[in-house]
Image (spheres, rainbow, N blue to C red):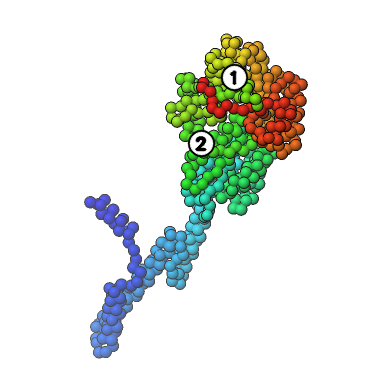
Amino acid sequence: MRGFSLSRAAAGNRTRRFPRNLGPMSILRHLFIFAAAAATLLLAASQPWGLNTAVLLFLLAGMCAFFYAGERRRLRHSRLLHSISGHIRALAHGGPGPTPLPPGAETAEVADALEEARERFRMAQQETNARLESMQLELHLDPVTRLPNRKYFFNELRRALTTGARDGEEGGHVLMFRQRDLAAINRHMPRDFTDQWLRSVALRLDQKLGRRHAPPFLLARLNGSDFALLLPGVTAATADQVAHQLRQELHALRVSLGERSWCRWALAIAAYTRGDQASRLLASLDHGLMRAESADTDAPVHADVPARAEAAGELQWRDTLVMALEQHRFSLSTQALNGPDGKLIRNEGKLMLHDAEARAPIAAEDFMPPAIRLGLSTECDIQAVRLALDWLVSHAGMLAVSIAVPSLAQSNFLPRLGQMLRDRPGQAARLVLEVEARGLVQNFADVRHLCEVASEAGARVGMRRLAEDFSAMTRLHELPIAYLRLGADFLAGMARSPGSRQLATCVRDTAKALGIEVYADGDADAHAQAFLDGLGIATLRRAPEPLAA
């Protein structure tokens, strides 16, 4: 019971509030005391009383006056305490005091203390707000580059996809770019130098591409090697210009990784409209980066919205590829390549992956980029060669299959390839292994080793996409290359470009001197076709439908 009473008393003390104004009972009490004192004095002066009686009356009047003065003092203290409590409550809420304290010597020190407390509280509140703002800023910034981080970028992207970054904007573009050699840079340079280089890259790109635009574009660092640039409300032409400028800036900011070796970037660009899903947009950009890495190019890759199977992340791709390799769920789609006269020159094989969740087989150009990224391209290329050799058992003619350049760098690939070719010499003699021309420049030793393995088994090596890296022409004399292929993009500009025609002439002359055949892929217009015929370059035409594998 004692504890309960103390608790109630404490609760009462916490909830006690002084009245804002003098109550009716207090007013009546003041009037009664004042009237009693006045009546006593009048009574003492109106009649001749005895000495004792007069003294008693005057004492009674004095007591009334004393009680009146005490009540006045209590009232003053009550008002003072009420004013102080008002100031304290205002101080707790961060506002000014309701009314100034009554003037007087006894309240001056209290007023000074309240003012000092109010100033300290204001300074503490400002310090707390600054600390909270700094913590919130740190929460949204990358600690190394001081760019907005992944969380902040994704929030802004989702806002742009749902309500538009600014009123009147129905869409825009997103640029994502990746530093492909960050691990090699960390091995080549001290970590502090790498962080300093990343900060300088971020600062330059933010100044050149982010802040310069009005309103500014959002440049963010998504993780260690991935960056993104949000371009709300820009057209496709403007986005392409920004991508081209970004490519130039990144090329200028490269660091050396040794003799004739520089760090590499991969770029992807995708358009969005209001209402798109952020996950599918980012999946398309990630797949575009994988395509750029697979092609080993720093040219911006336009990332279209992928199908369900293509939109899978790295973990899903790993599961799909590993299961397909374990269960041999691959096939080879072949297509005849005919010359201008309609005669068969050779067949072309393309590896296809059969996934239970995909409606149709997945082509190599879709699953090989993630396979290269995951280090599984070697196994996929082994499957392609195995299926090609099987196909040659029951089909006549030549068959060409593509080999990824990154697979050549794997220590176990070429020995396994050589053993497969030596085990089936009859089929190996009609097999052509194609590599991209860039491999001859950047991975010359690996391509030379491939040519040695193929030559020992009787197979041949061809080179495709020569127009993407004509510097490969300087190394042709060192390798037994069977043929060269010029891409469709090169043919498209040949009719209106004297330089392209001159390059084609140089390619023909060099290849002819080395005994190498030259072919052109795709359909050329009448003028380009006449020029190619004059040079003796055969144009390959694909059959209308693929042959059964």
Which image quadrant is residue 377 in? Answer: top right
Q: In terms of secondary structure, where does tag 2 sit? A: loop
Q: Residue at x 27, y 78 (%)?
A: 32
Q: Residue at x 71, y 30 (%)?
A: 532
Give the image location of residue 411, x and y in percent: 60, 18
The residue lying furthest to the front in this view is 341
* Location of residue 483 by image quarter: top right
Residue 487 spot, x, y in % from top left: 65, 31
What element does badge 1 sit on? Answer: strand
Q: Quadrant of residue 44?
A: bottom left
Q: Residues within 10 Å of mark 2 (few under 14, many from 20)?
A: some
Q: What's the residue at 70%, 26% (across, down)?
A: 537
Q: Which residue is rendered at x = 52% and y = 54% of the image?
A: 168
Is the Cβ of the residue at disc 1 closer than 8 Å to that at disc 2? no
Residue type for callout 2: Pro
How much space separates mark 1 and mark 2, taking CA atoms? 30 Å
Which numbered dot is residue 306?
2
Q: Which residue is at the front of the view, 71 or 381?
A: 381
* Count of numbered labels shown in the rendering: 2
On the rendered structure, is 120 left or right of 406?
A: left
Name the side, left or right, on which 415 lies relative to 495: left
- Mark 1 belongs to which amino acid? Leu
Residue 483 visible, this angle: yes
Q: Is residue 377 visible?
A: no
Q: Which residue is nearer to you in this view: 126 or 271?
A: 271
Residue 55 place in picture, x, y as percent: 27, 81
Q: Mark 1 or mark 2: which comes first in sequence?
A: 2
Provide residue 209's location: percent of width, then percent of height. 63, 46
Residue positioned most to the left:
1
What residue is pinned by disc 1?
399
